[in-house]
Image (tube, grey):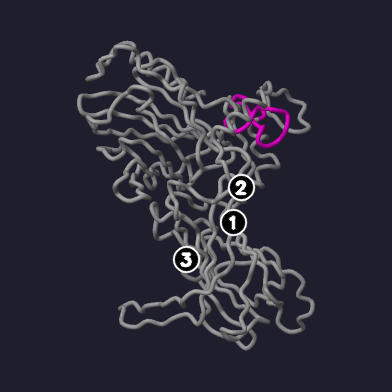
């Protein structure tokens, strides 16, 4: 079998119907481009500029990006921050970051500025940067975690010395047209707003100093703007029904002769390695395994066992992307029984309660450090799994009408495509579900499920 791609002479899998793709997108995509998420209504990235000192022709500022999103982080290759200067400012020097281009600095006869572009783009420095080029919270290759997963790495900072600028609070002109790529599109930034100067406390807390001037920029995320197609999907199964509900066909694209999102390669293709090392390797373009759903990530939810007072769920995350290892990944799911999670195996867990403790139906899961916090690229090691033991609530618990399956699933902050409700595994008629015995049919179904997870 073969790799799909423009200009390729190798055979490709048959095309999926465009109508199926349109239907899948209609079912899963948000209705508007507004940067609002019901599970994280206040989530944003705030960029704070603190002017620390004045110079003969400008100022020195510390710029810090705070990730206030509950479950969306910035992964490798990291953030890119851009803006447009209000006047003819230049960047004399930077610590902890650098601009991607210097621009035309030919008019400067003495010292040459770090950057003379009207619209500079700044990127983080890499780990291992010499200490004299570092400041606190810098040099992480642009990776910013969420506060829930790792609060100590949920911010990124750099120092910038600006010239040909104002030298007082009244003469400084704020930059405009801020952009944030993380690493691609998706974030929309507002205009800079002057706020109360930031205070800094000494280690003993007995003295406070403050910035000379502070302004904030708030950036919010929209999945609709970030990508044309979804990036993950959900499949379902249960012990009480032999049906395995796969991800909807063409959830993230269809196999075709074009490039993204149709490019794919079969796992047994002799051209697999050459496809991985192709031009898209350096642009971050996904190369996924050829499947009916064409998603880089699939989350499988299996209702595994039923006990008198508890029930058990197995969650499997499978990576079908040959070009991406997902570091510090996270999974968010919504289910009415998450208020009674009793035990969790091999994942970290935190409840999310964006509307107060009265509603506790959303949970965030992520890998255990040095064990499964790295989701490897597609292949034998490209999966992570865990089991949840939940206590039944006698008022609400049922296996009927798909109640045991999640209402919504996110991977790395992106909403995943769910199967249509009428396709969920249904409870057989007249099935007394008390304590589930281990029968031959359950064993056979377990083998079928394992095969599905390995090859689907």
> Label 1, label 3: how many angstroms apart (C-alpha)?
23 Å
Q: Secondary structure at mark 3?
A: loop
Image x and y of residue 65, in percent: 51, 64
Contact between labelled residues 2 and 1, with CB atoms less than 8 Å apart: yes
**Residue hosting label 2:** 225
Gap between marks 3 and 2, in whole Å? Answer: 28 Å
| x 53%, y 83%: residue | 53
> Compared to 133, does 334 lie above or below?
above
266 magenta-colored: yes
User: Along the horizontal axis of the image, is 394 left or right of 84?
Assistant: left
> Which residue in the protein does label 1 denote?
188
Residue 225 location (% of width, % of height): 61, 47
The secondary element bearing badge 2 is classed as helix
Q: Which residues are magenta?
A: 251-271
Quadrant of the snapshot with the N terminus: top right
Q: How dense is the environment of label 3, judged by Cα within 10 Å: few (below 14), some, or many (20 and up)? A: some
> For this view, does 270 lie left or right of residue 408?
right
């Amino acid at each position: 079998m073969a790799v799909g791609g423009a200009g390729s002479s190798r055979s490709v899998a048959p095309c999926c119907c465009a109508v199926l793709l349109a239907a899948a997108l209609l079912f899963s995509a948000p209705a508007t481009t507004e940067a609002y998420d019901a599970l994280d209504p206040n989530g944003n990235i705030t960029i704070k500029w603190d002017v620390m000192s004045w110079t003969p022709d400008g100022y020195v500022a510390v710029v810090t990006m705070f990730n206030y999103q509950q479950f969306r982080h910035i992964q490798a290759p990291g953030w890119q921050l851009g803006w447009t200067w209000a006047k003819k400012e230049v960047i004399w020097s930077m610590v902890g970051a650098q601009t991607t281009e210097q621009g035309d600095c030919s008019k400067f006869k003495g010292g040459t500025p770090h950057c003379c572009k009207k619209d500079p783009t700044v990127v983080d420095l890499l780990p291992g940067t010499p200490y004299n080029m570092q400041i606190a919270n810098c040099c992480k290759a642009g990776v910013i975690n969420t506060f829930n997963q790792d609060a100590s790495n949920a911010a990124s900072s750099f120092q910038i010395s600006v010239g040909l600028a104002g030298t007082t609070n009244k003469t400084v002109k704020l930059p405009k047209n801020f952009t944030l790529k993380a690493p691609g599109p998706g974030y929309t930034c507002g205009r800079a707003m002057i706020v109360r100067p930031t205070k800094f406390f000494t280690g003993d807390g007995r003295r406070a100093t403050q910035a000379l001037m502070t302004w904030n920029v708030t950036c919010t995320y929209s999945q609709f703007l970030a990508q044309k197609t979804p990036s993950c999907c959900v499949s379902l199964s249960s012990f009480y029904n032999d049906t395995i509900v796969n991800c909807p066909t063409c959830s993230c694209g269809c196999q075709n002769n074009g490039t993204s999102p149709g490019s794919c390669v079969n796992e047994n293709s002799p051209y697999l390695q050459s496809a991985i090392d192709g031009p898209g390797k350096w642009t971050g373009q996904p190369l996924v395994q050829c499947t009916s759903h064409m998603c880089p990530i699939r989350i499988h939810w299996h209702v595994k066992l039923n006990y008198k007072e508890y029930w058990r769920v197995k969650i499997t995350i499978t990576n079908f992307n040959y070009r991406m290892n997902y570091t510090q990944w996270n999974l968010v799911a919504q289910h009415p029984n998450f208020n009674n999670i009793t035990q969790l195996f091999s994942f970290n867990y935190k409840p999310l309660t964006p509307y107060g403790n009265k509603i506790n139906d959303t949970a965030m899961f992520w890998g255990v450090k040095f064990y499964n916090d790295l989701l490897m690229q597609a292949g034998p090691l490209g999966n992570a799994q865990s089991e949840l033991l939940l206590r039944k609530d006698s008022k609400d618990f049922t296996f009927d009408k798909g109640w045991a399956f999640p209402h919504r699933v996110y991977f790395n902050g992106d909403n995943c495509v769910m199967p249509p409700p009428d396709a969920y595994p249904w409870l057989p008629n007249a099935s007394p579900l008390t304590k589930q015995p281990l029968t031959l049919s359950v064993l056979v179904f377990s083998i079928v499920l394992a095969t599905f997870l390995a090859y689907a």
